[in-house]
Amino acid sequence: MNKNTLRETPLLYPELFKSLESARWNMAKDVPWEIFDSSLLTEEQALTIKFNAITEWAALPATEMFMRDFRHDSDFAAFMSVWFYEEQKHALVLMEYLRRFRPELVPTEEELHAVRFEFDPAPPLETLMLHFCGEVRLTQWYRRAAEWHTEPVIKHIYALLSRDEARHGGAYLKFMRRAIERDGPAAQKAFSKIGVLMASSGRSGKPLHPTNLHVNQALFPKDTVQSRLPDPEWLEHWLDEQILFDRECENRVIGGILRNLSSLFDRKLENVTDLNRYRKQLAAEAA
């Protein structure tokens, strides 16, 4: 990397702060708590809200990982202040919903602290791509959750969360574009490698998201966020049996990843095979 590049490239944090601030919703004013209808919330639905609240709390160890592994990038580290705040607010609004309407399901401090554990260091560019894909996926998961729920307040909350995750994905994409400008083929190689992994969920047989991937070898097999929840199997059940995240939904995730990588790489990537072929091309050129 040219040392002058850091000085010549404008910081992304000020622009991202401004855009995310303008779109930010207020938990007291923008959530219609007053229209809650207890007859439209089942115990099954309420329990899924608890598990999603705990999962969102895992933004805490993710932020600690980012701050450690991105010490070289103060711009991105500054952006984490916004991302962390908004992700923790997601956990908070789901817990506030339970506190008001299902207080017996509010996560305990012990349950929340269980998902705070150290992630092993990983290549920063791959981590960046992994979390971009995670935001694309979570946007679609929460969109389906809003459709599945029948109680109007939680439907509204999940719609807010889905839009937040989409904005976060857009922010990560800006950092990815800047990484390509600075690091060229190294960034393209990292992004294509993780892109192939995250767009191949149909072959893996499980949902691919940062909270469901192994991140601490010493703690294996309890080294995923999901494995440390009160019910480690809840995610697959939520996706397959409750919100019905089917092949059509999955294709929207894959399509979002491929469209954005097509834009980043300035080449048309219509499917995972195209992306994998490009990954191999980059590896051959590097060799």
Image (tube, grey):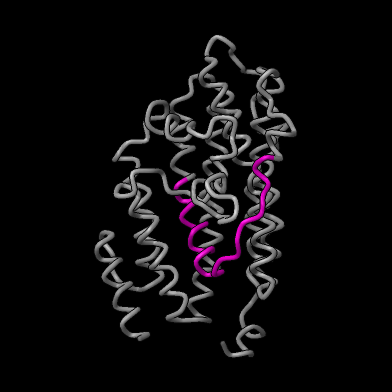
Q: Position of residue 27 (x, y in %)?
A: 70, 35
**Is residue 242 placed above or below 247 in the rendered structure?**
above
**Is residue 96 placed above or below 151 in the rendered structure?**
below
**Is residue 133 placed above or below 4 in the rendered structure?**
above
Residue name at image x 45 percent, y 39 percent: 141
Is 116 magenta? The answer is yes
In what quadrant of the picture does the N terminus appear? Answer: bottom right
* Left or right of 152 on screen, residue 85: right
Query: In terms of depth relative to the viewer, which is nearer, 14 or 110?
Result: 110
Q: Position of residue 156 (x, y in %)?
A: 56, 30
* Left or right of 278 on screen, residue 87: right
Residue name at image x 70 percent, y 49 percent: 85
Query: In terms of depth relative to the viewer, which is nearer, 271 or 109?
Result: 109
Residue name at image x 26 percent, y 70 percent: 277
**Is residue 237 placed above or below 123 in the rendered structure?**
above
Query: In terms of depth relative to the viewer, which is nearer, 104 or 121?
Result: 121
Start-end of magenta stretch: 114-137
Which residue is at the far top?
A: 39
In what quadrant of the picture does the C terminus appear? Answer: bottom left
Q: Position of residue 91 (x, y in %)?
A: 66, 37
* Left or right of 18 on screen, residue 281: left
Residue name at image x 49 percent, y 71 percent: 177
Q: How many marks?
A: 0
Q: Quadrant of residue 52?
A: top right
Q: Position of residue 226 (x, y in %)?
A: 54, 40
